[in-house]
Amino acid sequence: MNKLLLIIIFIFSAISCSEQEKPISENFKERGLSSLHAKEFKKDIIRIEENIYVAIGYALANVIMIVGENENVIVDTTGSEEAASIIKEKLDKISSNPVNNIIYTHNHPDHIGGATIFANTLDANIYGQENILYNIDNISTIIRPIIYERSARQFGIPLNKEDIVHQGIGGFLEINAETTTGLLRPNITFDKELSLNIDNISIELAHVPGETDDHLYVYLPDQEAVMVGDNFYRSFANLYAIRGTKYRNPMEWVYSLDKIRSLNAKYLVPSHSRPVIGKDNVYDALTDYRDAIQFVHDQTVRYINKGLLPDEIVARINLPPHLRSSPYLQEFYGSVSSYVRSIFAGYIGWFNGNITSLHPLSAEDKAEKMIELASKKTDLHEAAKLALENGEYQWAMELTDSLIAFNGKDQKARDIKAVAAEKFALTQTASNDYYFYKTVAGELRGDYEVYFKDIKVSAQQLKAIPMKSIMKSLPVNLNAEKTLDINKKVMFKFSDTEDIFILNIRRGIVELGYNEISDADLVVLSNQHEIKEILAGLKNIAQISLALTDGSISIEGGRLEFLKTLGYFTD
């Protein structure tokens, strides 16, 4: 626990689909897709409350209708006029009131492409968070060709219909060359919050960035119903879409889920998958969802700080059993491994820290060399040594990487890579690359070690560091393995400030809070500086024990429990 602080369109393409139920391929088990999950998207009009209906299964995204006395409000419109027309026909049988107000939960095309069908007039009120206009106007046009290609692969667009089991968050994607986009541009936008009263229906909109930076929720306080777009659905969150996407900030997503959770809603209505009903069910589902995102984030950052590479981190991170078994966290759409790599890139960038990946061989050159090695059944040590002698330094490093991965203590391979790195450094004109190669060469030989050394700040320097910054560093330093069975709330109160901090240590994660609670398991009373010195590693166990004895720190709930809590943040 000595570490004080850490690193302080979306254009879819698609498939055609008839009105009939989509057939489920018989060999889905071979591919790992779940036929049971496909049933989540059975065509249905679900009645949430007397005036709230959800159309599911007719397109990739749901359509939500809020019924008023004289007019209706639509939340999300699917991705095409064709799909919207089918849904409108069915919703009109429930209420054919005109629609003068449409709310987009975010900018993705499967939510905004059917607005012209639902709107009573083309100048209807179209609501969105203010970032939506930039995303509609820029992202989808700038990188449309590559997103088109990668979306086709992500959604299996060229495949036969019988090969489509489900799309993770929907039965099928309805946008294609045969369909028509019916987008109406948002004409009423807001930054943080917007309160509406439409036909005597109270509606609250709030900015909750998550899957996109323009995400909002729609909350109906009288019905206690919240519509959350794509910030929650029955699948592990899609924190990175392999079709390509901007970085999705995981902790922003967590904070947004906390904001939604604080509504204590009775109904949770996503724009993909079926609703969650009942306050306890909604609260528990949101808690598990946010905990899963935070768990992977915090443990990824923890391992990043230990110097592990993305593949090594992926191999180490699994959701705790209670989250892994949640019906809302199965990897039907998003995946933990993609999330880990996205977090790594988000914090560190594309370079994973292995010098071999700085200037790799082209795929063609590497393939040619691999085929030659295989045909001659060449020993890899000999091949690496020969590459070094021939001045093929990059190839020598790539070969030794395989040997080191197989046996991390293979000093012969490490020595070859060290020489290759030093030689290759001499070919570099960029000082950053030059020194990186040279330094790693010394590490490989064992000449020195480069690792994070705890920097002992002085007591005086510590005063300038806000307590909040120190507290915010704790979650990514939690040793999750020690706390998988722990549920403990620790409240810090100070004699010299009114600040309050809550550490809700909950089965592998730490949720930070800032408001006083009445059910804390431990209450720590002291001055800020005393606690800062402990968390910064300036006090050893004997000094902490003395502070507990002489009254500098007062504990309600047991001194031993306090010491145990400190131990959760050490390896």
Image (cartoon, grey):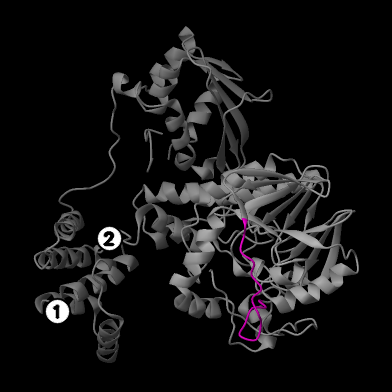
Between tags 1 and 2, which lies in front? 1
Of residues 95 and 489, the one drawn nearer to the viewer in this rendering: 95
Amino acid under label 1? Leu
Amino acid under label 2? Lys
Q: Which residues are magenta?
A: 173-187
Between the C-alphas of marks 1 and 2, the distance is 21 Å
Does the magenta run of residues contain 523?
A: no
Q: Is residue 265 left or right of residue 435?
A: right
x, y percentage for residue 115?
A: 70, 68
x, y percentage for residue 386?
A: 14, 79
Q: Which mark is residue 409?
A: 2
Q: Main secondary structure of the magenta part?
A: loop
Secondary element under disc 2, as helix, strand or loop, is: loop
So how many labels did they put on this image? 2
Q: Which residue is mark 1?
A: 386
x, y percentage for residue 328?
A: 69, 57
* Mark found first going from the N terminus, 1 or 2: 1
Q: Badge 1 local density, few (<14 within 10 Å), some, or many (20+)? A: some
Quadrant of the drawing holding the N terminus: top left
